[in-house]
Image (cartoon, rainbow, N blue to C red):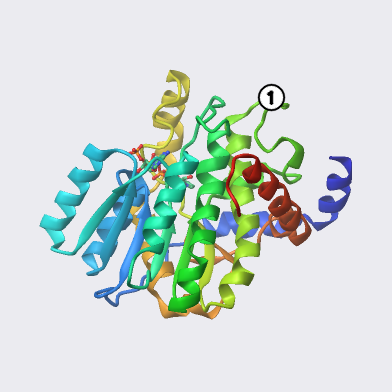
């Protein structure tokens, strides 16, 4: 850890934090052209940001595939959107914290005969207490990091053929909570005292680091990848946490939060506007490009994480 402090401390700048604070006051850029005839895949579209994003894309005429965990909620959203907007909408049921389900989603998307214009990896959780999935992996890490990574890697042959597409990771400014980077020897919080915020931030930081590696490979297939902070918005996030957290969320967090329509507007701009195709591997605060804090832009750390992830997944029988 000391070597990381020595490495990152001189790179930290107050201006980086001030830019983030300034960006928090910005409205997202809007894109007003339709998405008719194009396909968007959205994970976690039964609530919050994912749900509003599905509505936004539907309003713009997109063909939508939702990857949802809960069959009943998924049916309800599908029915509602199909009736209201008359756009084609399908859903695929998967628990994205399970390696087998993640791979099932990858295979399904790979089998689609048409190009996928935009994939939005949105599904996420905020958990106060450490949880392990039946695969024996920490849930945050799987949902925020391993899931988008595995699916994007599985789609490479499709991108190679289609030579088009965009990938968006719904990230969070909370990646900054991993101030001195990730602990590669304890990615799963087995040895350290678990903190909900720190584990959430670490999962998001790992996701951003993987974006740097994926951006290189995707560029050769003419596909872009970005990570974005969707704003601080009122959603169902943290609904399974304890009563104290619920009180804090209702009385403090939600009071300062925006509506998830703001995030959906930003995700439409990033997923549809031609302006975004100019670059890849960028972090956006809503739709404003933002310089990452030092540990999240450290390419050496990204490579090391990639190697460690390969080992971790190999132990679970998954090849990266
Ligand atoms: N809200 C904010 O202010 C904020 C800020 C920064 C980043 N984010 C990020 O935004 C994303 C969306 O969060 P939100 O605030 O909209 O939360 P939310 O209202 O709780 O929605 C989360 C969505 O993810 C789905 N999901 C959760 N676990 C899943 C699993 N194991 N498999 C499949 N789907 C699963 C949920 O499905 P169910 O309905 O079945 O639970 C729901 O559709 C997350 O990645 C979050 O980290 C949010």
Q: Is residue 223 above or below residue 262?
A: below
Residue located farthest toward the left when viewing the structure as drawn: 83
Q: Is residue 298 above or below residue 234?
A: below
Q: Residue at x 40, y 67 (%)?
A: 118
Q: Quadrant of the C terminus?
A: bottom right
Element under label 1? loop
Q: Residue at x 51, y 48 (%)?
A: 147
Q: Quadrant of residue 88?
A: bottom left
Q: Is residue 185 above or below residue 228?
A: above
Taking the image as shown, residue 74 lies to the left or right of residue 84, namely right
Q: Quadrant of the N terminus?
A: top right
Q: Crowding at label 1, few (<14), some or many (≥20) Cα neighbours within 10 Å?
A: few
Taking the image as shown, residue 219 lies to the left or right of residue 186, namely left
Q: Quadrant of residue 162?
A: bottom left
Q: Residue at x 18, y 43 (%)?
A: 76
The image shows residue 132 at horizontal and vertical percentages of: 54, 28
Foreground of the two, 175 or 12 = 175
Residue 25 visible? The answer is no
The image shows residue 293 at horizontal and vertical percentages of: 69, 55
Residue located farthest toward the front when viewing the structure as drawn: 317
Residue 87 visible? The answer is yes
Foreground of the two, 283 or 317 = 317
Q: Residue at x 29, y 38 (%)?
A: 70
Q: Quadrant of residue 106?
A: bottom left
Look at the numbered disc 1 and say if its residue's Cβ is closer than 8 Å to ligand 1: no
Tell me which image quadrant ligand 1 sits in.
top left
Number of numbered discs: 1
The image shows residue 210 at horizontal and vertical percentages of: 63, 57
Mark 1, residue position: 193
């Amino acid at each position: 850890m000391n070597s990381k402090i020595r490495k990152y401390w001189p790179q930290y700048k107050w201006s980086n934090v001030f830019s983030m604070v300034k960006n928090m006051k910005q409205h997202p850029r809007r894109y007003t052209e339709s998405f008719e005839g194009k396909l968007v895949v959205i994970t976690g579209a039964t609530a919050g940001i994912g749900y509003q994003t599905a509505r936004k894309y539907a309003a713009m005429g997109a063909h939508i595939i939702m990857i949802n965990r809960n069959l009943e909620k998924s049916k309800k959203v599908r029915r509602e959107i199909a009736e209201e907007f008359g756009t084609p909408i399908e859903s695929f049921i998967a628990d994205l914290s399970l390696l087998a389900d993640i791979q099932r989603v990858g295979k399904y998307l790979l089998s689609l005969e048409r190009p996928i214009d935009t994939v939005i990896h949105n599904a996420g959780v905020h958990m106060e207490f450490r949880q392990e999935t039946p695969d024996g992996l920490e849930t945050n890490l799987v949902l925020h990091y391993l899931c988008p990574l595995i699916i994007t890697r599985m789609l490479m042959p499709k991108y190679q053929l289609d030579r088009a597409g965009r990938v968006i990771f719904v990230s969070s400014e909370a990646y900054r909570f991993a101030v001195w980077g990730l602990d590669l020897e304890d990615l799963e919080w087995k040895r350290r005292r678990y903190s909900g915020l720190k584990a959430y931030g670490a999962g998001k930081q790992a996701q951003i680091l993987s974006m740097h590696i994926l951006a290189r490979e995707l560029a050769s297939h003419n596909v872009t990848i970005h990570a974005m902070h969707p704003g601080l918005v009122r959603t169902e996030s943290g609904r399974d946490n304890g009563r104290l957290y619920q009180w804090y969320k209702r009385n403090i967090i939600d009071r300062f939060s925006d509506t998830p329509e703001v995030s959906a507007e930003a995700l439409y701009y990033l997923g549809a506007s031609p302006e975004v195709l100019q670059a890849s591997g960028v972090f956006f605060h809503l739709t404003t490009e933002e310089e990452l804090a030092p540990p999240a832009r450290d390419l050496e750390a990204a490579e090391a994480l990639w190697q460690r992830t390969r080992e971790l997944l190999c132990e679970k029988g998954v090849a990266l």
